[in-house]
Image (cartoon, rainbow, N blue to C red):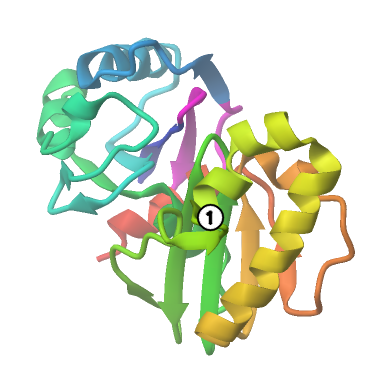
């Protein structure tokens, strides 16, 4: 099985060919997310990237929002026209291959979770993604990002890319440390996995249960979407 893994982000669209076990078979390719980031413009970007890849049989997509039965229901860092968009159907027609899509943090988690206990995944990028696994099973449609965090501001408002740029790395890392503690009280997690493009900006002593994982996991986890 050869899978075109796709990661749609607020700042970049990435693709890579992987096998059915999540092994990387090609180099990652990336283009900036088009603006405005409408469904058609993003699909066009995926088509351009896919045309430069080797042959593939199936497609796995990580999307920055809630995905239910192939339809995108939220898209806080993309164009509003994504709400209610049949992503799997439309991308399948565009590429001529079967497509499965899921929330991007869910996909990242599928690549890294150990399968025991409560495992929380956070992706630090343009926004903030989250996924929760219990004994390896995904708890669907968890969105921590838009819950209150500090002084009426949400987790995403304090930890997203805009907050990092506005507050600076030092203050952003302090907010992140507070978030680790608060989320531990909330979920009593056994492991917290930190991914996303801004994972490399984390410059603090990590608590024992917190681990940073490579951002490429957001592509490699796509193989799990095709496990029968």
Q: Position of residue 221 (x, y in %)?
A: 47, 53
Q: Which residues are magenta?
A: 10-28
As drawn, the residue found furthest toward the front would be 151
Q: Which residue is mark 1?
A: 155
Splitting the image into 4 quarters, where does residue 176 fall?
Answer: bottom right
Q: Is residue 22 visible?
A: no
Q: Is residue 12 magenta?
A: yes
Q: Position of residue 216 (x, y in %)?
A: 60, 43
Residue under the image location 24 percent in, 66 percent down: 228
Q: Nearer the viewer, residue 114 or 131?
A: 131
Judged left or right of residue 22, residue 197 is: right
Judged left or right of residue 23, residue 207 is: right
Q: Is residue 27 magenta?
A: yes
Q: Is residue 92 visible?
A: yes
Residue under the image location 32 percent in, 56 percent down: 225
Residue 29 vs 137, above or below: the answer is: above
Residue under the image location 37 percent in, 60 percent down: 143
């Amino acid at each position: 099985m050869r899978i075109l893994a796709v990661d749609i982000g607020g700042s970049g669209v990435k693709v890579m060919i992987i096998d059915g076990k999540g092994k990387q078979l090609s180099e990652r390719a990336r283009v900036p997310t088009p603006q405005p980031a409408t469904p058609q413009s993003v699909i066009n970007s995926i088509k351009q990237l896919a045309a430069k890849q080797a042959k593939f049989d199936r497609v796995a997509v990580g999307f920055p929002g809630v995905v239910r039965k192939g339809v995108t229901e939220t898209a806080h860092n993309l164009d509003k026209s994504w709400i209610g968009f049949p992503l799997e159907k439309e991308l399948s027609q565009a590429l001529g291959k079967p497509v499965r899509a899921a929330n991007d943090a869910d996909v990242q988690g599928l690549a890294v979770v150990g399968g025991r206990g409560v495992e929380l995944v956070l992706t630090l990028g343009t926004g903030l993604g989250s996924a929760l696994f219990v004994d390896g099973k995904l708890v669907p449609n968890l969105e921590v990002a838009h819950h209150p965090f500090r002084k009426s501001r949400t987790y995403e408002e304090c930890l997203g890319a805009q907050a990092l740029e506005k507050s600076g790395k030092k203050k952003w890392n302090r907010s992140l440390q507070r978030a680790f503690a608060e989320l531990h009280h909330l979920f009593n997690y056994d492991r917290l996995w930190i991914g996303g493009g801004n994972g490399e900006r984390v410059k603090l002593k990590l608590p024992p249960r917190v681990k940073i994982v490579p951002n490429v996991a957001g592509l490699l986890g796509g193989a799990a979407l095709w496990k029968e």
